[in-house]
Amino acid sequence: MTDVSSGHNVHLRERAYRIRRNALKMGEVQGQGYIAQALDIADVLAVSYFHAMQYRANDPEWEGRDRFLLSNGHYAIALYAVLLEAGILPPEEYDTYGSDDSRLPMSGMARYTPGMEMSGGSLGLGLSIAVGIALGLKRKQSPRRVFTLFSDGELDEGSVWEALQSAAHHRLDNLIAIVDINNQQADGPSTRIMGFEPLVEKLEAFGWFVRRVDGNDIDAVVAAFDAARDCPETKPRIIIADTRMGCGVPFLEAREKNHFIRVEPHEWQQAIEALDAARSA
Ligand SMILES: Cc1ncc(C[n+]2csc(CCOP(=O)(O)OP(=O)(O)O)c2C)c(N)n1
Ligand SMILES: [Mg+2]
C-alpha cells in the first residue's frame, strides 16, 4: 500500500536530512557541540522554515517576515544548520563555525548572525521576548507571526510561566511556541530534575491552544503546525514536541549523557554515513 501521507512531505524530510547533515559538518569543525539537540530538533526546524514561516532569504530583516526566536541559545548550531539550508547564510560558511571572527559562534549572538533574532545564552527569556514582539506586531496590525523555540530545561524557570500567563492574557494568537521535550538537561533527565507533567493540561489551563506530537514524525509536526495556524480561537498556540536526542544517527541516539557530546574525529564520517543510510532506507 502506498503511504500517501508520507509522500506529501518528502521535500520536508529531505530538508530535515540536510539540516542534520549541516549540523554534523559544523560539529566536525570543532570536534564537539550540542549535536544531539540539533539532530532531535531538525524535523521541527524543517517544518518551521520550509512549511510554516514567511521570510526572504536575501533580506533577513524584511519587516514582513515571521520571526523565529531561539530561546535556548545553545541550540545555535541547529539554527545555523537551517539558516544555511534556507540560504539566509551562504552554504560554505559552515566551515567557520566556532572560530574567531566567525558569524557562527558556538553560542548564538543576534548581533553577529543574519537571521538570528535574539541572543539566547541565558535560558528562560525567549518566550518573554516573543510575547513582547507578538504584542508589538498586533498593535501595529501586522499579520505576521512569532515562532519561538525553547527547551524542556527552561520549564524550570519561573519567567517562562509568567510569559505563558501573559501571552494568554494578551490573547496572542500570532504567537506559536514550540517546546522541545527531549527529557534531558545539563544535570540529567528533565522529568527527574523538575517534573512538569501533565504538561498539556497545565498549558490548556493557562489558556493556550496545545498540540502534543512526536517531534521526529514530520507528518505529525506538519499537522500540529497547521492546526496551530488554523485554530479560530484568539489564544496563543504551543506545540509540545517529544523528540529523541541524536535522532537520525543511531550510535549518537544511544549515547548516554548526550547534553554535550564529544565525538571522536573518525566518528564524524560514520555519523554522516549513518544519516545517509537512514535517508535511503
Ligand atoms: C539561566 C541559565 N541557567 C543555566 C544555564 C546553563 N545551561 C546551559 S544548557 C542547560 C540545560 C538546559 O536544559 P535543556 O535546554 O533542556 O538541555 P538539553 O536538552 O540541551 O540537554 C543549562 C542549565 C544557562 N545557560 N542559563
Ligand atoms: Mg532538554
Image (cartoon, rainbow, N blue to C red):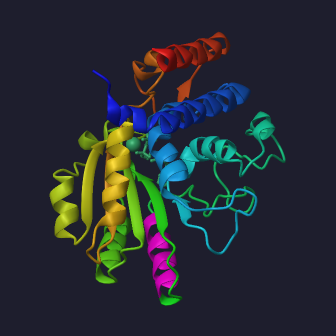
Q: Is residue 79 magenta?
A: no
**Quadrant into which the N terminus falls:** top left
Name the spot of residue 202 as percent of width and height, x first: 18, 61
List x then y, in percent, for residue 206. Answer: 22, 70
Q: Is residue 129 visible?
A: yes
Residue at the far right: name it: 101
- In this orientation, does residue 125 appear? no
Residue 218 placed where, x, y %? 39, 38
Which portion, as a residue range, is magenta? 125-138
Q: Quadrant of residue 5?
A: top left
Position of 176 relative to 64 (above/below): above
**Residue placed at 47% from the left, 60% from the top?**
148
Q: What residue sits 39% from the left and 18% below the top?
A: 254
Magenta segment, prevailing SS (helix, strand or loop): helix
Residue displayed at 48% across by 89% down: 139
- Residue 262 point in image, percent of width and height: 57, 23
Please determine whether, in this image, residue 268 is positioned above or below residue 208.
above
